[in-house]
Image: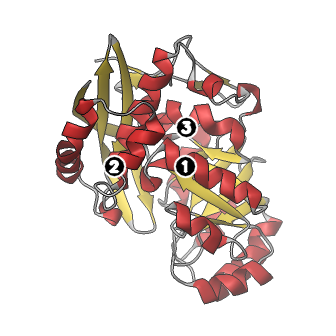
């Protein structure tokens, strides 16, 4: 067993701005596991909001290298469990490794990941396309550049309702709103009334992740369903979100990979909550992995590679009508440079 990794700078088509950060380039770490003539790829982007950098991901992977390369594990779940303590402060690095382990594991079996999981690829919901915060004029321009049936609109400005009202003039598409913790409970409830009239499907993470009392009010009085993102990072958060949110958005990089991500999805379903998996502007490596588990979901946000001006990998092809998987086992992604 051999572990290696490579750093890539992913250039974005537009400056991507959300409530608490902006970026033009997204750096990412792509992990490779090789064994018996097979290889698996996994990915995690960095994130300053969560203190995740390329150096600290590499550091923890090096700490775990002897266990990985020792090969005393037979499944991705077993490898994930072996690394639970080492990676507890860096789930992003664990995600990249876990994803690579799933890719390698299913390649050895000659199966696509969704085949191994016994999922139906025809059941994948249409991804949304994200419009980052900008001037209203530029947000309209970004939306018009990609004709899509569902848009996720990033908010958290002083003119949030004006943004949505103007965007609505230019399309009949479904809107999803993501405030990234920027609103108060009062704002969220008040905004939900107007947003419901504007064809918004749900609001994602309107309040700060620890504002549980506020979320009780929003959950009770909002005119729209509310989805947890920052409030639902790891497995133990799912139960905490029940009764505060109608749905959860699982980010594989935050959760620590496909292994815990699947458990979170199944637990949420048991609690009667809707599920989504979101991306963190990954290349086609990370996006392809998401696509394989997407048949389990009510909603999906896997537009990361679509936001790039240059992709170092190729994998699934996504259109509004369907997701096309490469005729390759595993997650189907491969590097192109």
| Residue 228 to residue 303: above or below | below
Say few, some or many: other residues with alpha carbon within 10 Å of mark 1 (under 14 / 14 to 19 / 20 or more): many
Residue drawn at x 60%, y 57% as measured from the top left: 249
Residue 294 visible to the viewer:
yes
Residue drawn at x 45%, y 36% as measured from the top left: 76
Q: Nearer the viewer, residue 335 or 308?
A: 335
Say few, some or many: other residues with alpha carbon within 10 Å of mark 3 (under 14 / 14 to 19 / 20 or more): many
Disc 1 element: helix
| Residue 17 to residue 185: above or below | above
In this rendering, position of residue 50 left or right of residue 209: left
Residue 152 visible to the viewer:
no
Residue 84 x/y as whole percent: 37, 54
Color theme of the render: secondary structure
Tell me which label, 1 or 3, sits earlier in the chain. 1
Q: Quadrant of the N terminus?
A: top left
In this figure, which residue is indicated by the disc labeled 3? 290
**Can you tell which of label 1 and label 2 is closer to the viewer?**
2
Residue 154 x/y as whole percent: 55, 60
Label 1–label 3 contact, CB within 8 A: no
Q: Nearer the viewer, residue 29 or 41?
A: 41
In this figure, which residue is indicated by the disc labeled 2? 83
Q: CA distance from mark 2 to mark 3?
A: 21 Å
Residue 66 x/y as whole percent: 19, 38
In this figure, which residue is indicated by the disc labeled 1? 261
Q: Nearer the viewer, residue 61 or 230?
A: 61
Q: Residue furthest front?
A: 72
Tell me which label, 1 or 2, sits earlier in the chain. 2
Label 1–label 2 contact, CB within 8 A: no
Say few, some or many: other residues with alpha carbon within 10 Å of mark 2 (under 14 / 14 to 19 / 20 or more): many
Disc 2 element: loop
Tell me which label, 2 or 3, sits earlier in the chain. 2
The mark tally for this picture is: 3
């Amino acid at each position: 067993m051999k572990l290696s990794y490579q750093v890539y700078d992913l250039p974005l088509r537009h400056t991507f701005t959300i409530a608490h950060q902006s970026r033009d380039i997204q750096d990412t770490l792509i992990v490779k596991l090789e064994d018996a003539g097979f290889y698996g790829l996994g990915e995690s982007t960095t994130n300053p909001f969560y203190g995740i950098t390329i150096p600290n991901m590499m550091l923890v992977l090096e700490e775990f290298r002897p266990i990985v390369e020792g090969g005393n594990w037979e499944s991705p779940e077993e490898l994930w469990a072996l690394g639970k303590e080492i990676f507890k402060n860096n789930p992003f690095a664990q995600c990249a490794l876990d994803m690579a382990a799933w890719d390698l594991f299913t390649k050895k079996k000659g199966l696509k990941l969704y085949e191994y999981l016994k999922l139906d690829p025809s059941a994948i919901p249409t991804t949304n396309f994200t419009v980052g915060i900008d001037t209203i004029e530029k947000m309209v321009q970004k939306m018009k550049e990609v004709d899509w049936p569902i848009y996720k609109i990033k908010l958290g400005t002083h003119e949030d309702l004006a943004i949505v009202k103007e965007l609505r003039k230019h399309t009949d598409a479904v809107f999803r709103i993501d405030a990234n913790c920027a609103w108060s409970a009062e704002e969220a409830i008040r905004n939900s009334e107007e947003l419901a009239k504007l064809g918004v499907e749900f609001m994602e993470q309107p309040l700060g992740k620890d504002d549980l009392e506020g979320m009780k009010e929003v959950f009770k009085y909002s005119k729209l369903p509310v989805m947890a993102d920052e409030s639902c990072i790891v497995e133990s958060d799912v139960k905490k979100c029940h009764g505060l949110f109608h749905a959860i958005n699982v980010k594989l990089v935050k959760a620590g990979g496909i292994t815990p991500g699947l458990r979170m999805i199944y637990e949420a379903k048991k609690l009667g909550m809707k599920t989504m998996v979101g991306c963190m502007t990954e290349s086609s490596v990370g996006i392809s992995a998401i696509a394989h588990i997407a048949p389990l979901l009510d909603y999906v946000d896997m537009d990361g590679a679509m936001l790039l001006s240059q992709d170092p990998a190729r994998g699934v092809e996504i259109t509004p009508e369907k997701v096309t998987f490469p005729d390759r086992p595993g997650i189907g992604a491969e590097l192109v440079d």
